[in-house]
């Protein structure tokens, strides 16, 4: 009788272990249906929290809570890219593995020209992929952007461009605020004039002005051919 009870207990334990394992697997592979009717994996809350912490570490918690929001619709899980798996030398290394693409909306209501996105890629554990540079995160002194970004508004930008000698040109200046990726990798004001325009081409000059300190970081010429 004791032996029968032992085997019954053993079977019950095995059943419960398998059942719990199956539940865990289902939880790890939760899916949602997108607008096209496709089933896609849901990003776990633990990884979303890690992504939040990464952005907070760059801009500060108060700035993050006030102006930066996680975009659950645009953020997604990506399996290994089939082309890259077959042609690894043609792709970035992170595309060979499962990864997550995180997107955040970045808006400052009192500065309506700030309406941008932040995006970066993490591995399956939520660690940011360093080889895939993050986009849209402002660089601020001591990694705290509260009352520290941006310090230069549109009117100040125009004055800086005038003082730098940007010509009036033949049309109104085009002034825009945006993230400048690459070597500079920060937010700028871009100011462009038009010095000539014909049926064959038009052209002028462009200044990039640091949105935090007003420094002219680049001066270049542009040409447009219809």
Image (cartoon, rainbow, N blue to C red):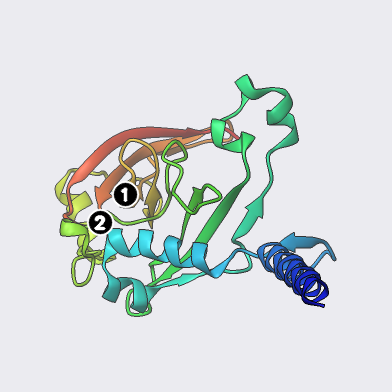
Gap between marks 2 and 1 measured at Cα: 8 Å
Disc sitting over residue 186 in the figure: 1
Residue 18: x and y in percent read: 76, 65
Would residue 20 be found to the left or right of residue 136 on screen? right
Q: What element carries label 1?
A: strand
Residue 160: x and y in percent read: 18, 53
Q: What element carries label 2?
A: loop
Would residue 217 be found to the left or right of residue 90 on screen? left
User: Label 2, on which residue?
Assistant: 211
The residue nearer to you, when weighing 219 against 107, is 107
Residue drawn at x 24%, y 58% is: 157
Task: Tell me whether the residue at label 2 lies in contact with that at label 1, contact meaning CB atoms closer than 8 angstroms.
Answer: yes
Q: Quadrant of the C terminus?
A: top right
Residue 96: x and y in percent read: 63, 34
Q: Assess disc 1: are there few (<14), some (14-19) or many (≥20) residues with their C-alpha within 10 Å of its C-alpha.
A: some
Residue 105: x and y in percent read: 48, 67
């Amino acid at each position: 009788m004791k032996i029968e009870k032992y085997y019954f207990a053993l079977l019950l334990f095995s059943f419960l272990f398998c059942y719990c394992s199956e539940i865990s697997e289902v939880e790890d592979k939760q899916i949602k249906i997108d607008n096209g009717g496709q089933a896609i994996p849901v990003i776990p809350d633990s990884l979303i929290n890690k992504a939040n912490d990464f952005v907070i570490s760059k801009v500060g918690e108060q700035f993050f809570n006030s102006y930066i929001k996680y975009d659950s619709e645009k953020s997604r899980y990506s399996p290994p890219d089939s082309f890259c798996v077959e042609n690894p030398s043609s792709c970035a290394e992170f595309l060979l593995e499962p990864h997550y693409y995180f997107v955040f909306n970045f808006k400052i209501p009192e500065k309506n020209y700030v309406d941008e996105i932040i995006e970066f890629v993490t591995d399956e554990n939520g660690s940011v992929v360093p080889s895939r540079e993050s986009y849209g995160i402002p660089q601020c002194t001591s990694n705290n952007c509260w009352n520290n970004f941006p310090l230069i508004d549109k009117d100040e930008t125009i004055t800086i461009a005038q003082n730098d000698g940007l010509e009036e040109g033949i049309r109104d200046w085009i002034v825009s605020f945006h993230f400048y990726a690459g070597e500079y990798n920060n937010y700028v004001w871009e100011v462009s004039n038009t010095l000539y325009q014909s049926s064959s081409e038009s052209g002028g000059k462009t200044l990039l002005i640091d949105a935090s300190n007003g420094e002219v970081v680049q001066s270049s010429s542009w040409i447009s051919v219809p």
